[in-house]
Image (tube, rainbow, N blue to C red):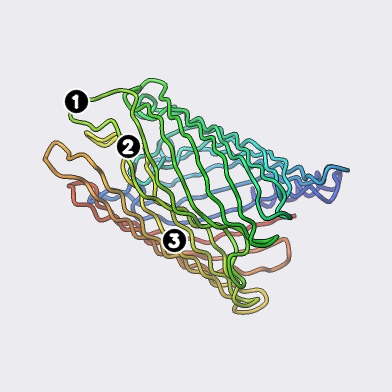
Amino acid sequence: MKKLLLLAVSLLVVNSAFAGDVKFLVSEDLSYDDNIYLTDGNEKDSFISKTQAGVTYANPIAGSGLELNATALGGYNAYTEDNGKNGFWNAYANVDVKNDLLKIGDSFLYTSDQANSELTERAKRLNNNFYLSAKTSTDKKFGFGVVANDSYDYYIDNPWKYDLTRNRLNAGVQAFYNISSKTSAFVEYVYTNIAYKDNTNNDSDGSAVALGVEGKIAQKVSGVAKVNYVMRDYSHDMEGYSSYEDLVGYYVALSWNPTERNTVRLSGERRFEESVYENNRYFTDTLVSLYGSHKLSDKLTAGLTLAYENMAYDRANNNGVKRSDDLFTVRPELDYQFQEWLSAGVWYQFRNRDSNTNGNDYASNKGGVFVKALF
């Protein structure tokens, strides 16, 4: 806690030299994890100290209608169990320029956390993601838009360095029917290219056609929801593998505020996800998450997250079994807002993965307390 207080005082001094659109963030999360390696048997537990610090900047660009935003965060995760092996640094940075019709930016991530739900091992990796979206005004009944992003994942540690280092390019066009100035229905086409640095057998081209709606979808409900048909063509044929795959997927990110004291958020996605599991180049990832919060008082908020994920593999493993994993997450939390700039809370998280293949089950219990300052 002393290091957090010293850091907060230092940043307060620096903040006095800047305009009001610069904010600093410091946080400390002390937690306990009873299964840090996510194993089924021989579990190892640890106390974990997660220290974070960062800065955000937001400023309108005069005469343009655009706003410039920048964020930089970094921190260290310290473990009481073999910190030389388990402790890691992390960093995140993002810069973008945006308004209601345009968003262009770039983000950078460095971490040693799990790469996706298939993996339980930590993997040091870098990600850089350039993104762009633009559309015409919603004042007219019909409009057009473009979307693009270029994402590069670089894995520092073996074996993931060979298996998963890759670049993914998405580029698409949209046509909108503007039901109102706040609500639009759209059709979308997106082309995708995935190119691996070394593991070129997994290179692929793909397309997705989607129908959706975005904006104010219903009374007090806003966000985006779409259903899509996704196709993938692999560049290299492999004996026993199909070179063409497809699926019906979806993407949902909705927020509902029934009262001033309540918030409900629904998110979910069904997609192809890159895989390193035996005999598989991908798995079908189906996710859905529901979060709800209620203000018990002006300062105290209770929240609950319920999530489900299924990972389904198309190819049988060496024992003739098509792997399928079900992952359940429950996370209640309490947040107390001492001041506008200072909050603290407690949380608990239970995760359970149930697999039809040996060695892939696990259960994890985590719990912790945190304090966060934004000034």
First of labels 2, 1 by sequence position: 1
Q: Which residue is mark 3?
A: 289
Location of the C terminus (image quadrant):
bottom right
The type of residue carrying mark 3 is Ser
Is 329 located above or below residue 278 in the figure?
below
Q: Residue at x 54, y 35 (%)?
A: 171
Q: Is residue 8 left or right of residue 364?
A: right
Q: Give the structural element (helix, strand or loop) at label 2.
A: loop
Q: Is residue 10 visible?
A: no
Q: Which residue is mark 1?
A: 239
First of labels 1, 3 by sequence position: 1
Location of the N terminus (image quadrant):
bottom right
Q: Give the structural element (helix, strand or loop) at label 3.
A: strand
Q: Give the structural element (helix, strand or loop) at label 1.
A: loop
Snapshot quadrant of residue 63? top right
Query: x, y percentage for residue 86?
Result: 42, 40
Q: Which residue is mark 2?
A: 275
Q: What mark, if any, has residue 279 been given in the picture?
A: none
Cα gap from disc 1 to disc 3, whole angstroms = 37 Å
Q: Neighbour class for label 3 at 10 Å: few (<14), some, many (≥20)?
A: some
Query: x, y percentage for residue 42?
Result: 24, 49
